[in-house]
Every structure is written in structure tokens, then in C-alpha cells.
Image (cartoon, helix red, strand yellow):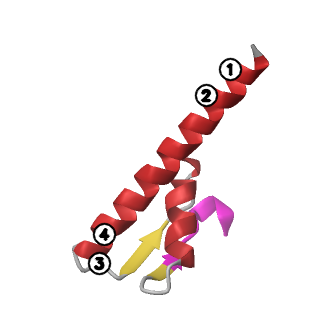
């Protein structure tokens, strides 16, 4: 039972990775090279990829309550 749970988590992680890479690729194909973002747990993988990409300028922003 635990191995099934672990395997599902791995599959979910692969889907998240693939989705983030697809979105970043689409942004770059559209000529977008400047991205401002607010922290969002749902976008964590995409924001990690954007931060690492040398072709994209990433401007991380903060929420008012984080000042």
C-alpha cells in the first residue's frame, strides 16, 4: 500500500515538472523574457524553473503582509 502511494506521488511530480516546463517553453516561444511573480505554492515548480533560466529576467514580488 505504501509503495502505491509513493509511486502515485512520483507520477504526480512528473506531471507537475512536465507542466512547468511546457508553460515556460510557451512563454519563451511567445517572446516573454521578463516575468514578475508573487509567491504561490501552486506555481512553485514553474517559478523555480523561471528563476534558473538565464534567458528570462525574473522579478519576484512580495505581498503587502510580507513587507
The answer to whether the residue labelled 3 contacts the one labelled 2, judged by CB atoms less than 8 Å apart, is no
Please tell me which residue is depicted at 56% across the width and 36% down the height of the picture: 11
Mark 4: few/some/many CA within 10 Å (<14, 14-19, 20+): some
Q: Which residue is disc 3 drawn over?
A: 32
How many numbered discs? 4
Q: CA distance from mark 3 to mark 2?
A: 34 Å
Q: Earlier in the sequence, mark 1 or mark 4?
A: 1
Q: Secondary structure at mark 3?
A: loop
What residue appears at the point 57 percent right and 60 percent down from the top-left corner? 39
Q: Indicate the quadrant where residue 14 lies.
A: top right
Image marks 1 and 2: residues in contact by CB distance under 8 Å: yes
Kindly identify the residue that appears in the image at 43 percent across and 82 percent down.
56
Q: Position of residue 28 (x, y in %)?
A: 31, 75
20 w.r.t. 61: above or below: above
Q: Nearer the viewer, mark 2 or mark 4?
A: 2
Secondary structure at numbered mark 1: helix
Task: Name the mark nearer the viewer: 3 or 2.
Answer: 2
Residue beneath disc 1: 4
Q: Is residue 60 magenta?
A: yes
Q: Which residue is mark 4?
A: 27
- Front label number (1 vs 3): 1
Which residue is under mark 2? 8
Q: Are marks 2 and 4 in contact (CB under 8 Å)?
A: no
**Residue at x-position 24% and y-position 80%:** 31
Amino acid at each position: 500500500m505504501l509503495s502505491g502511494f509513493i509511486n502515485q506521488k512520483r507520477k504526480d511530480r512528473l506531471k507537475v515538472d512536465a507542466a512547468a516546463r511546457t508553460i515556460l517553453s510557451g512563454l519563451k516561444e511567445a517572446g516573454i523574457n521578463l516575468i514578475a511573480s508573487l509567491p504561490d505554492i501552486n506555481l512553485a515548480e514553474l517559478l523555480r524553473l523561471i528563476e534558473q533560466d538565464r534567458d528570462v529576467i525574473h522579478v519576484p514580488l512580495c505581498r503587502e503582509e510580507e513587507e
